[in-house]
Image: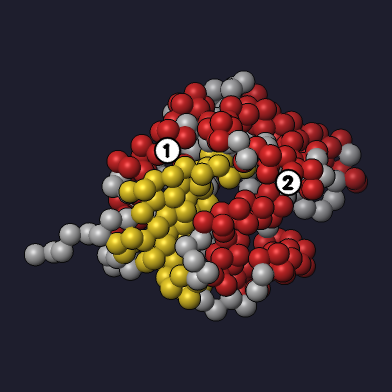
């Protein structure tokens, strides 16, 4: 099935079951990135692929026509500190789409309970930055890949982190406005909670609890597992992501730009104009280190024979 037709099928399913979307605008933001990442998929179809950090299952569903079998993994339970929503969303979404070649697995990327050299491809969509021990996770990814197997790991870039304070204050403002509206205009605030509120990692009930939950304010809290926003800003450079992959033993590492426009800019532009701007940035290699998001492509060397 052509990618565009399949994307539209997934979009219709989400429109009919909006509770399967983890946050408002998730599909619109992710689908163009998945389409871009699919350009690096090795061949038309692989036999066995592993996903780390499957979230609500969108990527596994999108890529399911391009693999004989996909094992989609994530932490089994809900853990908002690790940005994990568990596996229930993915299970419902996969069932809703009647996908038969995707299997769910509850595990951490740091300890994948699968045999050595058992996959042709390992991919992950914005998962690696949330893994506490990235070095250990990448060694596990290398272990389960056959010799010559490839990675497609999307991660945030320096530019994304640079804009993150603006996104943080925008989302925080929306949440505060939503609470004020529900308090002072309850009749106009019936129904589901606004995006981000239902799955908010912190619940603020007073000024004291606000500063306990946001100790770095007015700077944002780290998005991933770093100690501060500044540490993330430094870590997310393209050159550092390449070094991390090579240190884990991957060869032929390439850090590909996935997207350049911040989400709030995309939201203001017509789809066609945003797509044209993205294509324009990608034509100029000098802009590559300034991408909002990268795709880490690497190749696993063959493991030495045991014994």
Label for residue 275?
2
Query: In the picture provided, is 27 more to the left or to the right than 272?
Result: left
Measured from the top left, where is residue 22 in percent x and y?
65, 54
The mark found on residue 241 in the picture is: 1
Query: Which residue is depicted at the point 51% across and 44% down?
Result: 256
Q: Do the residues labelled 1 and 2 touch (CB within 8 Å)?
A: no
Whether residue 12 is situated above or below residue 258 in the rendered picture: below
Give the structural element (helix, strand or loop) at label 1.
Answer: helix
Please tell me which residue is depicted at 77% across the width and 63% down the height of the picture.
15
Q: Where is residue 138 in the image (x, y as percent from the top left)?
A: 35, 49
* Label 1 crowd (10 A; few <14 / some 14-19 / many >=20): many
Residue neighbourhood size for the residue with mark 2, other residues' Cα within 10 Å, grouped as few (<14), some (14–19), many (≥20): some
120 to 127, vertically: above or below: below
x and y percent of residue 32 in the render? Answer: 67, 52
Q: What element carries label 2?
A: helix
Snapshot colouring:
secondary structure
> Horizontal placement of 248 versus 44: left or right?
left
Q: In which quarter of the image is residue 61?
A: bottom right
Of residues 226 and 142, the one nearer the viewer is 142
Pick out the residue farthest to the left: 307
The mark nearer the N terminus, 1 or 2, is 1
Q: Is residue 93 left or right of residue 239?
A: right
State the separation of the CA atoms marked 1 and 2: 26 Å
In depth, the one of 253 and 61 nearer the eye is 253
Q: Quick check: 301 above or below 95? A: above
Q: Can you say whether 210 is above or below 279 in the image?
A: above
On the image, the x and y values in percent for residue 84 come to 51, 51
The label number, if any, that marks residue 297 in the structure image? none
Q: Residue at x 75, y 48 (%)?
A: 193
């Amino acid at each position: 099935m052509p990618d565009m037709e399949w994307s539209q099928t997934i979009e219709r399913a989400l429109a009919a079951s909006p509770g399967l979307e983890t946050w408002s605008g998730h599909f619109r933001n992710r689908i163009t990135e998945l389409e871009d990442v699919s350009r690096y998929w090795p061949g038309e179809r692989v036999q066995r692929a592993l996903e780390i950090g499957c979230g609500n299952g969108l990527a596994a569903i999108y890529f399911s026509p391009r693999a004989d079998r996909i094992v989609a993994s994530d932490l089994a339970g809900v853990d908002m500190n690790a940005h994990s929503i568990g596996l229930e969303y993915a299970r419902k979404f996969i069932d809703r789409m009647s996908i038969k070649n995707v299997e769910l697995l509850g595990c951490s990327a740091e300890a994948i309970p699968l045999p050595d050299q058992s996959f042709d491809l390992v991919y992950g969509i914005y998962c690696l930055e949330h893994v506490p021990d990235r070095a250990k996770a990448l060694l596990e990814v290398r272990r389960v890949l056959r010799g010559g197997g490839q990675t497609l790991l999307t991660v945030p870039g320096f530019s994304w982190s640079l804009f993150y304070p603006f996104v943080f204050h925008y989302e925080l403002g929306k949440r505060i406005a939503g609470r004020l509206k529900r308090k002072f205009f309850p009749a106009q605030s019936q129904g589901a909670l606004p995006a981000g509120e239902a799955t908010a990692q912190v619940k603020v009930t007073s000024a004291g609890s606000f500063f306990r939950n946001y100790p770095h304010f007015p700077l944002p809290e780290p998005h991933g597992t770093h100690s501060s926003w500044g540490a993330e800003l430094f870590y997310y450079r393209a050159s550092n992501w390449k070094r991390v992959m090579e240190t884990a033993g991957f060869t032929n590492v390439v850090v590909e730009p996935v997207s350049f426009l911040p989400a709030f800019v995309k939201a203001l532009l017509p789809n066609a104009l945003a797509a044209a701007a993205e294509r324009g940035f990608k034509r100029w290699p000098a802009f590559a280190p300034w991408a909002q998001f990268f795709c880490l492509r690497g190749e696993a060397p063959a493991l030495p024979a045991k014994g």
